[in-house]
């Protein structure tokens, strides 16, 4: 049986970060736990915290499972993570500015040209353009896993529109409402400042043509989108308008918002739609979600789009393997957080290794997300492995492979009581005039015993994440 690092228990003794929870858990009767769990679900339903799973019949909206047992980090653990996350966000943005400019990292032979310039996420429409403050990715979601007391790895980078921050905020709100006593007894760093931090970050990257206080909006594809709750939640919390494509129009080199008081100029658009749908005159001509002429306004400095079109090339899971090299190349530093060892199936020798060891590896699509299009070898059947091997042989460049990590576990409330379940962490790093993040992030938990897949679309849940104050 594989041995996993248990974040609460070390050799049967409670680890220091969780000492404040031991009595709370021990003294909570099963009936109270069940009542509180029902109360949490009722709150989520009343607030409307749902997500959609595409491809399901009927009403696809569902509640995301919420686990009441928090995950805890010490101040020292968080300091190290924060430094590593900020370092990575700086390097990723430097890479994006470079590859849409002179391409020095490619010229130096540190990353293959084809991997960048033939990447489907590379947008030639912004080549040669430097966005305000040189920031392409304004909200960087870094997915982290833990395998030991001091061992953290970056699983992947999300540089376009990382979702889930609304769950981070609502998890904390609901925990404070249900268990105010444990917040009185434990000194926990707050996360509720995130919306104001996000608004300030977005305002700080307003274009030079902006005069006065910048007008910020959130551009959503609409209420059928799986993350629509989050779009409306953030707009409410930030005090900005939530708009859809038809609410905006371009004129005179600027973007305008239709209002009951007449057109209002928009300076910063926090977009939650994909590049392909942003502007039918530049990208997909059949898009009904975007704003015709938006890219002309963007390139002429009339508006800022966050995150910038083209930022997705840094999300590519094959490009991910080169992030440590980016840190060395652009920052002259050694990576604080390590990558997971990764095989690029586009390389024949690495493909051969992956095909020989599929039963032990996790294989992912380079542009995949949400836990879709992946193979978890140790959990797969022989038929599934054989079918996936055929996919790899047909299009090896579409996949990478990684070892099956011993993800740490955190105590989780289950039907029979409390049991360890595997977790990961997505902190949200904001990049503008400054690089900042709130102490914590979204902990996702694999609720099925033994499962390593934490994505909500695959049956995962969420937890409140605590960072203890010093």
Image (cartoon, rainbow, N blue to C red):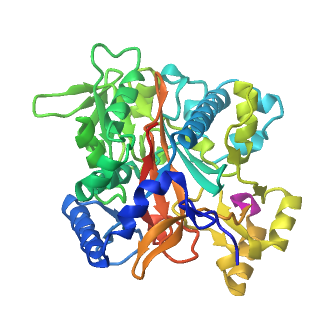
Residue 432 lies, in percent from the top left, at 46, 26
Q: Quadrant of residue 110?
A: top right
Q: Is residue 348 above or below residue 201?
A: below
Decide which of 190, 374 is in the foreground and name it.
Answer: 190
Quadrant occupied by the N terminus: bottom right
Q: Residue furthest right?
A: 349
Q: Residue at x 46, y 21 (%)?
A: 433
In the shown orientation, is residue 266 left or right of residue 67? left
Q: Residue at x 79, y 41 (%)?
A: 112
In the shown orientation, is residue 453 left or right of residue 192? right
Q: Residue at x 65, y 32 (%)?
A: 95
Q: Is residue 394 above or below residue 107?
A: below
Is 398 included in the stretch rendered in magenta?
yes
Decide which of 275, 280 is in the foreground and name it.
Answer: 275
Q: Quadrant of residue 368?
A: bottom right
Residue 220 lies, in percent from the top left, at 33, 47
| Residue numbers of the magenta segment | 396-401
């Amino acid at each position: 049986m594989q041995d996993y690092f248990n974040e609460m228990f070390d050799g049967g003794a409670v680890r220091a970060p969780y000492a404040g929870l031991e009595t709370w858990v021990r003294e909570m009767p099963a009936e109270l736990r069940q009542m509180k769990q029902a109360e949490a679900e009722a709150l989520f339903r009343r607030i409307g915290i749902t997500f959609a799973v595409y491809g399901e019949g009927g009403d696809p909206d569902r509640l995301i499972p919420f686990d009441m047992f928090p995950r805890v980090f010490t101040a020292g653990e968080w300091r190290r993570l924060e430094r590593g996350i900020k370092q990575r966000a700086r390097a990723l943005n430097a890479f994006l500015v470079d590859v849409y400019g002179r391409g020095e990292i490619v010229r130096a032979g540190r990353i293959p040209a084809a991997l960048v310039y033939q990447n489907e996420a590379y947008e030639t429409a912004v080549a040669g353009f430097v966005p305000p403050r040189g920031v392409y990715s304004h909200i960087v979601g870094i997915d982290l896993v833990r395998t030991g007391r001091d061992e953290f790895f970056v699983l992947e980078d999300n540089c376009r529109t990382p979702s889930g921050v609304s769950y981070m905020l609502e998890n904390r709100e609901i925990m404070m409402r249900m268990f105010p006593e444990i917040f009185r007894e434990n000194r926990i760093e707050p996360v509720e400042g995130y919306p104001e931090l996000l608004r300030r970050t977005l305002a700080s990257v307003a274009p030079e043509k902006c005069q006065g206080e910048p007008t910020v909006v959130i551009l959503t594809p609409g209420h059928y989108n799986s993350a629509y709750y989050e779009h409306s939640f953030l707009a409410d919390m930030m005090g900005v308008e939530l708009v859809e494509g038809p609410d905006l129009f371009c004129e005179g080199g600027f973007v305008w918002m239709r209002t009951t008081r007449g057109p209002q100029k928009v300076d910063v658009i926090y977009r939650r739609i994909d590049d392909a749908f942003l502007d039918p005159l530049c990208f997909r001509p059949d898009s009904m979600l975007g704003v015709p002429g938006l890219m002309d306004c963007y390139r002429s400095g009339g508006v800022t789009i966050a995150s910038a079109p083209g930022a997705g090339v840094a999300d590519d899971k094959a490009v991910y393997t080169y992030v440590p090299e980016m840190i060395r190349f652009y920052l002259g530093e050694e990576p604080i957080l390590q990558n997971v060892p990764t095989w690029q199936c586009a390389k024949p020798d690495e493909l051969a290794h992956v095909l020989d060891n599929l039963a032990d590896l996790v294989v992912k699509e380079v542009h995949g997300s949400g836990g879709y299009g992946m193979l978890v070898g140790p959990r797969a059947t022989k038929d599934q492995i054989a079918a996936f091997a055929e996919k790899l042989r047909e299009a090896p460049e579409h996949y990478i492979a990684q070892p099956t990590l011993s993800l740490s576990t955190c105590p989780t409330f289950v039907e029979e009581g409390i049991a360890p379940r595997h977790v990961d962490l997505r902190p949200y790093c904001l990049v503008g005039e400054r690089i900042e993040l709130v102490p914590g992030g979204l902990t996702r938990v694999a609720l099925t015993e033994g499962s390593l897949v934490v994505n909500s679309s695959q049956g995962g849940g969420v937890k409140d994440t605590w960072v203890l104050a010093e």
